[in-house]
Amino acid sequence: MAEGNQDTKSSNQMWGGRFASGPDAIMEEINASIDFDKKLFAQDIRGSIAHATMLAHQGIISADDKDKIVEGLNTILSEIQSGRFEFSRKLEDIHMNIEARLADLIGPAAGRLHTARSRNDQVALDFRLWVKEELQKTETMFSDLIAALLDRADEHAESVMPGFTHLQTAQPVTFGHHCMAYVEMFGRDRARVRHAIEHMDECPIGAAALAGTGFPLDRHMTAKALGFREPTRNSIDTVSDRDFALEFLSIAAIAATHLSRFAEEIVIWSTPQFGFIRLSDAFSTGSSIMPQKKNPDAAELVRAKTGRINGSLIALLTIMKGLPLAYSKDMQEDKEQVFDAAENLELALAAMTGMVRDMTIRTDRMRAAAGSGYSTATDLADWLVREAGLPFREAHHVTGRAVALAESKGCDLSDLSLSELQDIHAAITEKVFDVLSVDASVASRTSFGGTAPSQVRQQIAWWRARN
Ligand code: ARG
């Protein structure tokens, strides 16, 4: 392609046939997507090779032209990979940058590549391939995070900590059990990723501009060559659909929400007041003015990433809202949202996996906190139901009086004497002290999915078999 064609005065070399002059500078500025869609170069080239191969197989272009096209595209691939390719904003996007360079390299045969194809199905293909690969990468990252949590859960299946509701001490649980709650969340995220991959596994190329084409394509052949299950079934939908991008962003937003909850807990746990964990130096920073400080910056940033990821989801939902069928240029705005969300989700997942693996669990501090705040009050009430036959509501009332007494004396429930307890209810015996310890409390919660170490180990084994 002659360089002279690329000045602002001449019309676009790709579609400029009916244009007398080139675009206004502002038009070029608003129209060009190459600065961000160059990320799709490998997918664009793979798609073009599959398309050209199919065209030759169907006798739509000659085998000779196909060979030239494939060779040229491979040259371009290595030029881009080695940083030798010059991207031009005048050529708008990745598709036209590559096609123009192909013409430079192989001459008129390059013009045959775009037979029975439009940039509308081309970009739908490139972007779908990119999102599919990103989902596959994300799936692995969820598995890594789950593996890290399973290891910590295993290590701490018996380590007692306070369980909270309303961030008030509720009942003792184990740290292993708490970790497994996040395994469930990230497990659901990973399941959503797998489902999305299955959902989007249809090949757009061959839908052409919107109506399909009269050329005798074999869309099943291109679908197979590009690793898709099958071709899409409606050419109009194919070029106007960005559900795969919206699904990616929805999954990312839900996962970011999970990550932010965990990050928040890490921030709280690492304060001197809680002191449940110590973050490694690798995932914290110091203060430039206060020498004593160690800040949980990685956790705070993971917490914050939720903002921009949610923003990307809302942005693309809003871009797509009310768009008439089929393709509109609005849809060019889809990529930056997905690229940014993907980059930041990957970062957040990697940082969280690192923190989980590196943090020191301060079991002594967790145990001390677990025993305070009358966390075994429910165990006392349950004991009164089981051993003394009280209705639960009455047992709840009796226990409330024991808590009030302990509170007035400034001690724990287990520090009350037997006679003090018997003054509250005569049926209480020495055996009650067996259930007032945090270990006894935790060990007793053997209901399926409960916090007893035996249950936690059972759930760890279930997940290990699936990770
Ligand atoms: N750069 C465009 C995009 O990202 C490619 C498709 C352009 N199609 C068109 N009819 N102008 O959406």
Image: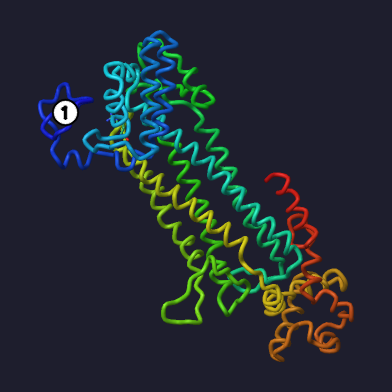
Examine the rendered structure and indicate whether residue 155 appears above or below residue 172: above
State yes or no: Cβ of the residue under disc 1 lies below 8 Å from any atom of ligand 1: no
Examine the rendered structure and indicate whether residue 301 appears above or below residue 47: below
For the N terminus, give its image quadrant.
top left
Q: Say which of 433 and 464 sits in front.
A: 464
Question: Which residue corresponds to the image point at 41% horizontal and 29% vertical from the top-left?
Answer: 125
Examine the rendered structure and indicate whether residue 123 appears above or below residue 270: above
Q: In this view, does 19 lie to the left or right of 372?
A: left
For label 1, the crowd category at 10 Å Cα-Cα, with few meaning under 14, some 14 to 19 and many 20 or more, is some
Question: Which residue corresponds to the image point at 32% horizontal and 23% vertical from the top-left?
Answer: 118
Q: Quadrant of ligand 1?
A: top left
Residue sticking out furthest to the bottom: 409
Residue 333 percent across, percent down from the top left: 32, 41
Q: In the picture, residue 182 is in which quadrant?
A: bottom right
Q: The residue tagged with tag 1: helix, strand or loop?
A: helix
Question: Which residue corresponds to the image point at 16% horizontal and 42% vertical from the top-left?
Answer: 26
Residue 155 percent across, percent down from the top left: 73, 62
Q: Say which of 39 and 423 sits in front.
A: 39
Residue 212 percent across, percent down from the top left: 37, 18
Q: What residue is disc 1 on?
A: 5
Residue 151 percent across, percent down from the top left: 69, 57
Q: In the picture, residue 307 is in which quadrant?
A: bottom left
Question: Which residue corresponds to the image point at 19% horizontal and 26% vertical from the top-left?
Answer: 2
Tell me which amino acid carries mark 1. Answer: Asn
